Every structure is written in C-alpha cells, then in structure tokens.
Image (spheres, coloured by chain):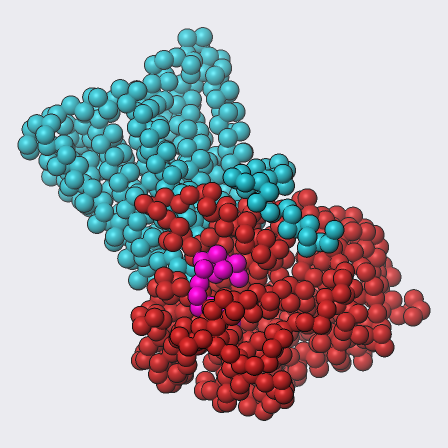
Chain colours: A cyan, B red
Amino acid sequence: MSNENSQNKKFDLKELPGKAMHKIKTFNWKEWAKDNIFTLVAMGGFVLLLIVFSFLPQVMRGPNVTFWRAAVLQRYIEQVTVYLILALGACFVYLMGSMDISVGYQVAVFATIFIAIVNAIGTAGAIPLALIVIVVLGLVCAVFNAFVGAYVKLPTVMSSVILMQLFSGLTTYLYGDSGYSARAIVVSLNILNETWVRVIVLVALIAIAYYLTNYTVVGKRAKAIGSNKLAAQQAGADLLKTRVLCYGIFALFLCVASVFAIARKDSFGEADSVSYQMDIMIMLLMGGMPLSGGYKGRVLNTVVGTLTYVVLNLGLSLCGVSAEYVFFVRALIFVIIVCLTCRKPGLLLPR
Amino acid sequence: MDDKGLIFKASHMHKVFGPTVALKDVDFELHRGEIRGLIGENGSGKSTIMSIASGMQPATSGEMLYKGKPWAPKTMLEAQNGGIAMILQESNTIHGVTVAENLYAGREKEFAKFGFINMRKMYRAADEVLKKFGITAFKGSTKINSLSFETRKLIEIIRAMEKDPDILVVDETTTALSFDGREILYGIIKKMAADNKAVVFISHDLDEIMDKCTHVTVLRDGEIIDTLEKKDFEKKKISSLMVGRDIGDTYYREDFVPSSGEEVGLEFKNVTWGPIKDFSLTVHKGEIVGIGGLSDCGMHFIGQIGFGARKVSSGVVLRNGKRVKSPSAAIGLGIGYVSKNRDTEALVLEGPIRENILLPSLSRLSKFSFINPKTEDEIVADEIKRYSIKAHSPKTYVSKLSGGNKQKVSFAKWTAARCEVIIMDCPTRGVDVAVKQAMYKIIDNMKKEGKAILLISEEMTELIGMSDRLLVMKDFKVAHEFTRSPDLKETDIIEYML
C-alpha cells in the first residue's frame, strides 16, 4: 500500500461513523501521558498529600486528630468553596496568557459594597440589588482590563496592578474611616454555609467552566490567544471581544465568590482576602496550569490545584504547624514548582 | 571516492520521536569538496540527520565520525565551535538588538574590557564582516527589527560563516531569502566546495538542488533510498525516488487558456497603505490572479491588505459590496489568508491540529453558543484526509509536525472554513514535490469550484503554471500584467521584476 493511502486509511472516519476522534486506534497512551504530564503529576501530588495528611496529624498530635472527620471535611469544603470559584473564573484569564493580581482587593470591595447595600435596606430583598451592583462593577473592571490590554498595548497584568492600587485605596477608605476592621451583614446568608449547597454550586460552576472552555467560541479563542495571539487574530479571534468576555466571566465568578466569602462569617474583614491573588496563582500552578496560557491549560488543572492547595493548608494546620511556618512550606513548594517547570520553553512558566 | 576526503560519517543512525520513527538505521557519508543535496518528502528525515550532526538533538542510537574522530555535540554552539554550522528553516535572530549583537551573540567577551563591552569595536568588526560578504545596505549598528525577514535570514548565514565552518548545513533557507540574498548564499556554497570543505543543502526545490549540488541523496520514510552524482541527475528520476512512484508529468494546470467567472470575488479600489499608493485590482470568481516580484516589492502587503490585516489609509477592499476592515470581518465575508509567516502568523504551533483547523470556522459552527464536537470531528477528519496530513492523531500538536505538514494544516483551515476567496502568500513554501503537486491540484479544483484566488509567490514557475492573470510588482507598484499563455517564460517576468 502506498504511503499516501495508508495515511488516508488512518484518518478515514467514514469507516467509523459517529465515533469521536479520540476513539481511533491510533491513540497512544505513552504520547498522551507525555502531553499531560503536568496534570498527571498534579493529580499524583494531590493523592500523595491526602495520604500523608491521613496519618501525619495523628503521629504529630495524637490519635484523635485526623483529616477524615466530618467536621474537618466540612471545613475543607468551606475553604475550597471561595478559592475554587475564584480559580475557575481566573482560569479564563490565565488561558489567554494574562494575569490578574487585583483579585483579593476586588473581592474586598465587592463584599463591602454588598454588605453596605443589604444593611442599608435591611431585608433579604436587598440581596438581588446588591448582587446586580457588584456584577456591574465587576463587568466595568473587566472592560477596563480588556481595553488596557488590547489598545494601550500594556501587558494585562499592568491593568490589574492599576486596579489593585485603586481597590486597595478603596478598601482602606471603606474600613479606615469607620474604625472597624470588619463589617457584619444584618441579613444572614447561612443557607450558603450548608455543605450540600456548596457542593451543588461548585459542581455546577465546574460544569459551566468546563462547557465554556471546551465547547464555546470564547473558550476556544481564549486558548488560541494564549498559545499564539497573532495567529489567533488572523484566524478571526477578536482580541478585545475575547478579552472582554473572559474578564467578564471572571468578574461573575468573582462576585459569586464574594458572596460566599461574606456568608462564611456573616461579615467581611479588611484583610480577609488580601492574599487571594497569590493563592490563586499558586493553586493554578500546582494544578499544572501553564502561566503562559494556551491549549495546555484546562479546568481540570484548576480543580486539582485548588483541592491540593487547601489539603496542604488544612493538613499543615492539623499537624499543628504555626501560620508563619505554613507560609514557609508554601514558599518552598512554590520554589520546587518553579524549578521543575521553567527549565524548558513551552512548560508551565513563560521564560 | 576514496576515504581520504571523508569529512563526516554517520553509521546506523536511528532516531525516534515518541512512536514516530524519523530515521531508520541510516548510514551517511560526506566528503570534502561536495555540495550534497538532501531531498525527500516532508517528514522523510532529511533535516533530522543534519540536526543531529549539528547538535540540535541527540540520536536515539548510532555513531558519528567527524574528521575521523567520534562526534557527539550536545549543543549547536558546541557543533559550531567544532566546525559544523547549520542555518535553520525558521527565523533565528534576536529581536530588539543590533545586527552586530546578533552576529556576536555569545561572543561578547571578545569585545569586553573590565566587564564593559566596547560597542564601537563590535560595530566596526561587524561592518568589516558585512563588507566581506558584499553587504552595504545596512551596518553593524542597525537595529535588527528595522530589517526584513529575508535580510535577517542573511544575517544568520553570516553568523554561521563567521566561525569558518568545515561543514555548512543549509536547511530550506533559500525560500526565506531575497533574490540578492540567494546569490550571496550560492556564492558562499561554491567557495566552500572550492576550499575543499563540504556543504549539505536541504531543499524541496528540485531545480535548485540539481543546479547547485554535486551530489544528491534521496530520503524516504527515514531511509536513504539512493545517492546520485551530478552526471546522473534527472528530474523525473529523482522525483520518483522521493515519492516511491512515478508522479507523472502533470504538475501545474494543464490548460493554457485564461478563464474566470463574471462575478467579482474581491476588489481593491484605489488602496493606499504605507508605500503602496492607489492600488487597484479585481479578482473574479473562478480566477487565479498571481502576483510576483522580489520579496520586498510590496506584494506580501497586498495579501495582508486584502485580508484586512493592514488598515488602509485611503481606498477600500470590497467583497460583495462590503468593506473588509479586519481579519475577523474578512473571515465573516468568506475570505481566507494563508500567511507566508507560517509559524508565527498562520499556525498556533502549541495547539492541536484539530483546533488549528477549526479556528476560523468557530463562529460558523457555533449554535446558541454551543459547538458540537461531533461536527468538529467530521470537519477535521475530512481535512486531514483531503491533505493527507501525516500525524498520529488530530490532537497532535502542530509543533511536532514537519514543515510540509504544517503548511497543509494552514491550508486546511481555510478549506474547512469554506472560504470563497483565498489569498495565498507563498503557499508551497517548504513543501515537497508530491505535496506541491497535490496542492496545485487543490488550487485548480478551487478555481473550478468558482473560488477567487489571489496567489502571491516568489516562485515564478508556480505563478506561470497556475495564474490566469499575472501581475509583476516592482517598488510597490504593478510593473506589468501578463495573461496566461503557454509561451510565458520566467525570463519575461524577471525583466519587469528587476
């Protein structure tokens, strides 16, 4: 058989009616594992940490301290909720090879404005209005981020630096003058603290993010822009439109996360969210998401990264490791990831 | 030939990339004074042999001898210092710095005193080197970004020659060079052979290989099929050795009567952009309009303007009475564009073949914001079959494909998008003879289907063989227009180009 014919045969899907490409016999496990090495390592890391923290707290602090207790698992889901919602939204920005370091301050301002509106009206009926206000504010920030990236030709991280300064000032203004470091909400959002509500919301948001990244124009174009901006543009991707949509999706996730953040304590404190931007970056890296964006980034990376990060935090705290040491451990892990992933071009970190 | 002249030898060389076998137990010998052409289809392994010899990648197994001693360079720099220099197919210069800094990258210490680099000294040295190669159009202090893609390629050649190599490997470089640049390269190659050194010339251009080389080695599917001496060179014989079958005599269009539909496919109306002033052109449905000229004559800009990738300062580009304002508008109007800069503009290298092919079709395929993966799979399978794209799976990343297969993907994007107007800028660049033949057939079929085609090319034979009308550009203006004819010769065109 001639070479040409043999190739044709390999890809003639008409012989396999209705079957998807990945079911073709040419699928190669080794090749697949090589292409997905970071996701596989990230998943391995998650399982390893789960195993380690299954027995380490018992060894260090006695037989009663274990990860596998209902109360601890509830705490785990509670901590995962806000982080995962934020990370899923951030995933759209990171897929384009962009970055947002204003997340924590945006959450602080949105949460405070939400509380202020609800408190001013004083009834549960105020919640939709408060939500609309913060969503509009979030979308304005999204448009700002997208415009700066597309027209001023600045790296998008710079627009988020501007927003970070702005929102940091706003946070200081909102909390500084009042003399309180935290604001309580008069209408309880306790329903959002139910574990089953959290799980349903998380599963739904994961499904939405998965759908948007894999089966819609915006998700596919975001990945193309992350891999090669110029080629994506020449194939019809409107840079500004895609950026506005991706930052817009991020803003919506951010607003939902802000509400869940308030619900945790029925209040929100000035410093509650300041570390979020760095936490998200580490979570995504831990999950194998390339910071340069592109087709290698997936929602799965985001989920695995967040679950791992929270296991690590909670596990260390169960072991009795004090807060300052937790920072050291996280820094150490970050250094290890950087060393492993930025040695060759095309890996997770841009060089 | 006796072994005294042997300069390089590879024995039982084997190279695998994952499940792909690129080289199968290859034995290769190169002698002093030879200009050895390496020719084969895309993915035949011709670049792989020399990339191993020049330190770009290691062999999976096998041995190499260079000047009689074992040879296993770990990096390109190590190979270059040892005397084997390779000029690559794609751009390899450093942006944002000067010509001199590119020429002496990694050798800055030669110009340094107490840790400070004497830039004047470096510029002077660069100026002297440029003069030696007959280049006066720019200097060592010229910023590399101000130079064209073609000129930058020339700088790579000079950088490779600076170390006075014993073996020069030229990998598919001539297509990236200007007319003058090619002459300089041919001069270098001749001189190296005369100085009893060796040159390996990797190219898809059979005429060029036959004209410039003393020997030619034909590869197919990772194996050496035959090595011929100049006296045995015969175009048909080499082609059939490459492909493994007789490819026949038909290559370009067989008819010599210019033809086109009545309706207009794409229209440039008094377009002005940068150095291009008041340019007008009408491409009809079912017509192939060719544009030829030297690489810096402005023809590549015409393609970009037609696709909306460059905003005109006056005039309009029209399709069905609507203005083409941007690439996304152009795609919406059914215009496709195969860019000359394949790796930087036409393809998302770090993306799967599947997603690359589908990228321009996304808006069309989206229904209520959902894109059905089954429809996508069918489209991709059709395109992979149409172009015989050689890959393990549609999910294979484009960066892992050979040059010709990459080009097939950049073509497939626009057939998948069902474009009615296709602007092709050097569409068969870096593509082998069999693929070229298949692509010409596809272009001819597109014409027969009533598509309007704007074919911009630096290959005169291609333009003569395919175009209904042929515009020759010089200094950003149309210098002459030819109509399809069996009597049209390359010399007729060159007269207006230069």
Give the residue drawn at x 76%, y 62%. B245
The stretch drawn in magenta includes residue B415: yes
Instruction: Check the image and name the residue furthest to the bottom.
Output: B495
Q: Is residue A125 above or below residue A163?
A: above
Q: Is residue A175 visible?
A: no
Q: Nearer the viewer, residue A28 or B296?
A: A28
Q: Quadrant of the C terminus of chain B?
A: bottom right
In the shown orientation, is residue B20 left or right of residue B295?
A: right
Q: Nearer the viewer, residue B102 or B384?
A: B384
Query: At which x and y percent is residue A172?
Result: 18, 41
Instruction: Check the image and name the residue furthest to the top.
Output: A63
Query: At which x and y percent is residue B416?
Result: 48, 56
Give the residue drawn at x 78%, y 48%. B61
Give the residue drawn at x 64%, y 67%. B437
State which quadrant residue B490 falls in: bottom right
In the shown orientation, is residue A266 left or right of residue A229?
A: left
Q: Is residue B279 above or below residue B440?
A: below
State which quadrant residue B100 falls in: bottom right
Query: At which x and y percent is residue A168?
Result: 23, 44
Q: Which of A210 and A280 is in front in this view?
A: A210
Instruction: Check the image and name the residue furthest to the right.
Output: B2
Q: In which quarter of the image is the N terminus of chain B?
A: bottom right
Residues rendered magenta in the picture? B410-425
Q: Is residue A200 above or below residue B109?
A: above
Q: Which of A248 and B211 is in front in this view?
A: B211
State which quadrant residue B86 falls in: bottom right
In the shown orientation, is residue A127 left or right of residue B229?
A: left
In the shown orientation, is residue B431 left or right of residue B347?
A: right
Query: At which x and y percent is residue B56?
Result: 68, 57
Q: In this view, does A130 lie above or below B14?
A: above
